[in-house]
Amino acid sequence: MEKNLYVIIIFFILAITCIATYNIIGVEVAEDGRLIESFGFIPLALFFSTIGVISAMDMGIRFFVKLIRKNIR
């Protein structure tokens, strides 16, 4: 159970790092009107946070299933 918790924490830290990196780098408009940004960090942050949420839900469901099975016996 501790390994799953570490995985969840790592994914959330990666998501926060991607968001922070995107904000630190910033967005600029070039003189010719093009938008210059590091767009890749947005989908990465969404991916890492989604994996973290799915892992947390999986861990919670497994915990409650074990708890219910323990109380039935």
Image (cartoon, rainbow, N blue to C red):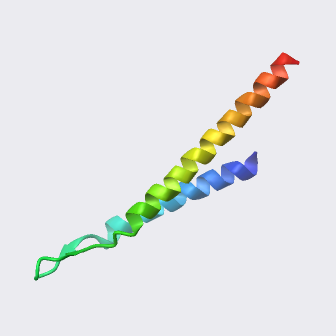
The tally of labels here is 0
Residue furthest out toward the bottom:
31
User: Could you tell me which residue is drawn at 78 percent across and 30 percent down?
Assistant: 66
Determine which quarter of the picture holds residue 54: top right
Residue furthest out toward the left:
32
Provide residue 18's location: percent of width, then percent of height. Answer: 44, 64
Residue furthest out toward the right:
73
Q: In the picture shown, does residue 67 fall above or below 4? A: above
Determine which quarter of the picture holds residue 7: bottom right
Residue 42 lies left or right of residue 56; in this view the side is: left
User: Could you tell me which residue is drawn at 28 percent across and 73 percent down?
Assistant: 37
Residue furthest out toward the top:
72
Provide residue 10's location: percent of width, then percent of height. Answer: 60, 58
Q: In the picture shown, does residue 37 fall above or below 52? A: below
User: Could you tell me which residue is drawn at 40 percent across and 67 percent down?
Assistant: 41
Provide residue 30's location: percent of width, then percent of height. Answer: 15, 80
Determine which quarter of the picture holds residue 62: top right
34 vs 16, nearest the viewer: 34
Residue 14 lies left or right of residue 18; in this view the side is: right
Q: In the picture shown, does residue 38 fall above or below 63? A: below
Q: Quadrant of the C terminus?
A: top right
Provide residue 56's location: percent of width, then percent of height. Answer: 61, 43
Q: In the picture shown, does residue 70 fall above or below 41? A: above
User: Could you tell me which residue is drawn at 61 percent across and 39 percent down?
Assistant: 57
4 vs 34, nearest the viewer: 34
Q: Quadrant of the N terminus?
A: top right
Residue 55 lies left or right of residue 12; in this view the side is: right
